[in-house]
Amino acid sequence: MKSDSLRQFYIEQLRDLYNAESQIVKALPKMVEKATHPALKDAFQLHVEQTQQHIDRLQRIFTMLGERPSGEKCKGMEGLLDEAQDTMKKHDNSDVLDAAMIAMAQRVEHYEMAGYGCVRTYANTLGLSDQAQILQETLTEEGETDHKLTAIAEDVVNADALRAG
């Protein structure tokens, strides 16, 4: 019984992540468009492609489970993306915009890493090691994106924002 309950929670969390990724893939093109630093623009564009791969991986897991991905709305991601939109509007014509977008993107990455870390652990607990490996791929990519954003911020964006201000 407990395993069934954990399995249901696992599926709910996968659906939440699926919805979160779907929201992100819609929001990222605007960030690509607004980014002014070429490295940041490239990082956001790459993440659009990776996010689609993340959605594809989740769909593969749902197929393995015999489940559908729909049914959960990720309110946490909705809130993070709403906050990102507000921040982008506030700094739209500012040299701080790229730094602000990096901060918002990293909040999203950390939220995703927490979610993927949990579902990967549930998959292992449920004996679904093949799914855990798939989830680890995405978790690794999310971490790499976070580190890339930190490097872009530290190498150019934050210094440019400071000089401009």
Image: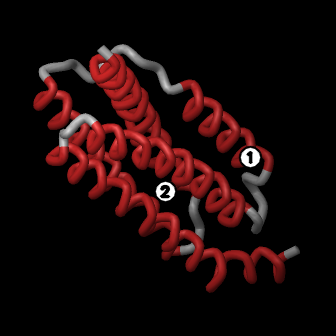
- In this picture, is 49 found above or below 2? below
Colouring convention used in this rendered image of the protein:
secondary structure
Instruction: Choose top left, top right, bottom left or bottom right for residue 78.
Output: top right
Q: Nearer the viewer, mark 2 or mark 1?
A: 1
Instruction: Choose top left, top right, bottom left or bottom right for residue 42.
Output: bottom left
As drawn, the label of residue 87 is: 1
Q: Pinpoint residue 8: horizontal percent, then vertical percent.
A: 32, 19
In the picture, the quarter occupied by the N terminus is top left
Q: Is residue 106 left or right of residue 62?
A: right
Q: Which residue is mark 2?
A: 32
Residue placed at 19% from the left, 39% from the top? 127
Q: Pinpoint residue 27: horizontal percent, then vertical percent.
A: 49, 41
Q: Is residue 21 left or right of residue 125?
A: right
Circle 2 crowding by C-alpha within 10 Å: few under 14, some 14–19, many from 20: many
Please state which amino acid type lies under the numbered disc 1. Thr
> 26 or 106: which is nearer to us?
106
Q: Is residue 96 left or right of residue 57?
A: right
